[in-house]
Structures are given as structure tokens and as C-alpha cells.
Amino acid sequence: MMNGGDFVDNKSAVAGGVEDVYGEDVATMEQPVTPWTVSVASGYTLIRDPRHNKGLAFTEKERDAHYLRGLLPPAVLSQELQEKRMMHNLRQYEVPLQRYMAMMDLQERNERLFYKLLIDNVEELLPVVYTPTVGEACQKYGSIFRRPQGLYISLKEKGKILEVLKNWPERSVQVIVVTDGERILGLGDLGCQGMGIPVGKLSLYTALGGVRPSACLPITIDVGTNNEKLLNDEFYTGLRQRRATGQEYDELLHEFMSAVKQNYGEKVLIQFEDFANHNAFELLARYSSSHLVFNDDIQGTASVVLAGLIAALKLLGGTLADHRFLFLGAGEAGTGIAELIALEMSKRTGNPIEENRKKIWLVDSKGLIVESRKQSLQHFKKPWAHEHEPVTKLVDAVKAIKPTVLIGTSGVGKQFTKEVVEAMASINEKPLIMALSNPTSQAECTAEEAYTWSEGRAIFASGSPFDPFEYNGKVFVPGQANNAYIFPGFGLGLITSGAIRVHDDMLLAASLASQVTEEHFEKGLIYPPFTSIRKISANIAAKVAAKAYELGLASHLPQPKDLVKYAESCMYNPGYRSYL
């Protein structure tokens, strides 16, 4: 098959030569698939295999060929009709967690239908399989646990991690999302129950980025939990001990990183997810030169926020360097975003990054980060300690710094009070307010509050979704600064280019692939709607892949002539295949 000027072997449609065993890519759509790897006497196992099960969509001929007669009711339904029925059923549930459980059940029963539903109804179902509902699911994971998904690696497996990885049935893994459950969203330490996050993230890698399901592996590393409620919960599914730290923790993580590379090779992407600040920065620094690693909380959040800021310049005017930024929250997300903004300013102005950092101020739990506090600061906060008298309250910091942009990454809800938003509105004609903490309950303010307290002048974006809001006869549509805009396309770009390392310039390239139109700007949107997300992901993948080739970090050679078309050809298609 010709694609982008290069010959793409249908058996290895995803770059890097990983064989498409199950016929999951667009490039293999026309090929019939044989779902069996062993001889069988009955189709009973076929309808219990989520990867190949089509339910009532098996045709008459398929039912004869695969011993399914009598195992299914006689009706034959199309995938579209199955989708319609499933959506009807989902909408009957009033409790979001019930929808989440119904979607997880579907994923374990019929994988293709699950992804068809998610892709075709992305704006409705994204809040169900991801934030905010996934947060509640993690909190109650022990109670709703049915069938294990992904791999659990605990301290019990120390010295045997390579064997554990080999227990996973797939050999062609391309993306691993791993957490240790210590800082799940804004909900804190959920231990082993954090598995909901890697599972949710990887379903988005497939639905939004087109990375095929068989290439995705969710992993939870269980080193214990310091959450007393979980330790005393009889239904808790993880290790009942306090968290291991120091050498014991480092050795387990090192064994894990070495085993992953040994088992899956140099080009497997390892995405760190929801690690506590101290470990997140340490792991990224330690392994970024030896593995293909990416921290979504530090780098993914930074990239998606930078994309929103660049789009917002069309509404605010000026360049990034003309604006002043104030962050509430100086952890992984806050410092990651701040650093990427400073880096992009340097690329545009040629000024040293140290000079650009002076336009960015951070507030942590003790107040404004200033020079006089430098000795007591954690290492990742020190670059942001500028000359200024100490300020403890956020509202006073707003009045002193006079920022044009206020960004919340604190993980603590209701911090952007009426006083804070009014102060922003008194300083700026169009204050840009980004309340990024997840889930919705932890957002620094709601869309309604931002628009009302600023008298309809704010440009607002949040981490979790908010409904459109009418103020003085005008409908405002809040933007969602969701990492799901970036990481699926980012990962696809790394895979299609066969990248061996992640570079900051790739994050900038992903941020600059913004798809916001004039129509969106008129509604005050600085992010495009999710309905066009697969197209956006293909464009981001192409930009990231192009940067990988430019930096000499790509191993899939020669470079395809049309990277967008090539990315699209590698994307998973959830349509049913013919088994004849």
C-alpha cells in the first residue's frame, strides 16, 4: 500500500515495524482477519474474547464458519445499531459512576464497540471514562473491582519484574502508562486503586490518538499507601502497608525501568502518571537520557496550557513575552508549565531563559515564591524565586504582581475567590483565568464564577469540563485545558517516527499544532471542541514526528513524505472486521 510516498507494509503499518497482528490499523482495513490462533470446536471462546467479539453483529456466514450457531439469538445487528442501543442504555443512568462501570464492562466484553462509542460520542463520554468520573472510580476501585485490567507490580514482585512483564499476553507493546498511585488527580494517595488512571489514559491513547489497544499496557506499581482509610478498608485491593521510600522505592523503580527496556525494547514509550512531586521530577531527570519517557503531569499539562496561551494571544493581543503570569501551585504542573512558557519565550525573543522566568511568578502553600525563601525551597521551585517582599495571600499577590494570566494548578478547590477574580478583572480588560485542577470538585473556581465575577470579560479554561454559561444574554463556552488534546497525538508521533528519546522541542511542536478557528474565538474558546480530536491528534503526531526527524531522534527511516497522512494510516479503526 502506498502512503505518503513510501511503501507501508500492511503487516507493520505502525512505524518501527511492530506487526499488526489483529488487523487494527486503518492500513489493514480491507483485509479479512482470522480471529483464531488455535483450532477450536466451538465459538464459545470467541464471543468471550473482547478483542474479537462482535456480539449480535456476527453475520450468518460467520456464525456458520466459527461454530456460533445457537450461541447467539437469531437477530443480526449492525455495529451502528449496537452503538445506538448502548448509548440509549448509558443515558438511562443518572449516576456518572454507573456509566463508568457500564463502559468498563463493555470494554471487557466488546473492545471495538467500546472504542466506536468513545470516538463517535467523545464529548459526552470523555468525562465518563476520564476526569472527573475516573477520580470517583479510583476512590471506589476496591468496591467496583470486577476483572483486573493491566499489570500490578508490587514490592512482592521485587527481583521478578521481568517475569511479571512476560505474563502479559501482548508482545508488541508500544505505550506503557504507569502510576504508583501517590497523587491521583487532586485526590491524593489512592495506592493500588490508582489503576483507574493508566486504564483511562490508555483508552484515550486509542480513541483519540489511534494507538491500537493491543499496543497499550496500563501498570500500577504498588509500594503501599499512607492513606489510613484505605489501610483500614476490608475491600482494599493493594498492599496493606505504609509506602516504601528511599532506597527500597528507587531499587524497585530501577528494576522496573530496566525490565521494560529488556522486554519491549528501546522504543517503548513509558508515561509517568500521578506520581508525587518529589518522585515525579526525580524519575524524569533520572531516566530521560536512557529511556523514552514522558511525564504527563509535568510535560503534557505544560504543552496543553502553552497551546491555550498561544491561542489566547489572538484574543488578548501581544506576544507571550508581553504578558505576566501568576500561578497558584508550584508542583509538577505549575513548574512544568512555567518552564515551557519561558522556553517558548526564549525561542521567540532570543532572550536567555533566566530573563523570561522573571515574568512568571508562583504562589505555593506558604505564599509568593521570593528570593528570601530560596534556602528552604525544593530544588524545582528555586528558579522561580524572584526579588520581592514576602506575600502570603493570593489576592495580595495578584494586586502586587498585576498578572494578565492567572493559572491554578494547586489541586485545591475554590481558591480563586470573588476577591481574586475581581482583582484580575480590575487590572485587565480581558483577564485570562485557567482553573486547571481536577476533578471538578478541586477546580480553583467554576466557569460561572469566573464569568460572573469578571462581568463577562474573563477568558476561562479549566481542567475538567464545565457547561456553557449565559451572562447578560451572551453564551460563554468554557475551554477545557485537557491533556487529552496533547498526549494521544504526542505518543502517536513518537511511535510513528520510532523516536528513541523525548526532547523539549517536541513538546513545543505539539503546543504549536493548535487547531482553533475564528468561530471558536468568537465564543471565547481557546481550545477546539473534542469532536475533531482525531484530526488534531494526527496533526500533532506529524509535528512531533517532524521534530524527531529534525533532531536525529527518529529511527523509522526513510521519513514518510506526508507525515499527517502517514499518521492517519497508522491509526486504529474500531469498525468490525470480516472473519471469513
Image (cartoon, rainbow, N blue to C red):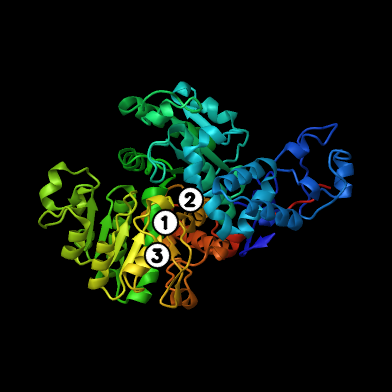
Query: Label 3 amino acid?
Result: Glu
> For residue 43, what is the image quadrant?
top right
Q: What separation in Å lies between label 3 and label 2 (alpha carbons)?
A: 19 Å
For marks 1 and 3 on the same chain, the one whose residue lies earlier in the sequence: 3
| Residue found 67% across the figure and 57% down from its top | 26
Marked residue nearer the N-terminal end (2 or 1): 2
Q: Tell me where residue 86 appears, x and y as whole percent.
A: 69, 52
Element at label 2: loop
The residue carrying pointer 2 sits among few (fewer than 14), some (14 to 19) or many (20 or more) residues within 10 Å by Cα, namely many
Evaluate if marks 2 and 1 touch, with contact meaning CB atoms under 8 Å apart: yes
Q: Residue 548: image x %, image y %?
A: 45, 56
List x then y, in percent, for residue 29: 72, 55
| Residue at which label 1 appears | 463
Secondary structure beneath disc 1?
Answer: loop
Q: Amino acid at mark 1?
A: Gly
Label 3 or label 2, whichever lies nearer to me, is 3
Q: Quadrant of the N terminus?
A: bottom right
Label 3: element kind:
helix
Residue 117 drawn above or below residue 190: below
Q: Which residue is mark 2?
A: 131
- Residue underneath mark 3: 448
Badge 3 vs badge 2, beta-carbon distance below 8 Å: no
What x and y, as percent, mark residue 350?
A: 25, 67
Name the residue rendered at 33%, 49% in the picture.
412
Specify few, some or many for label 1: CA neighbours under 10 Å numbering under 14, 14-19, or 20 or more. Answer: many
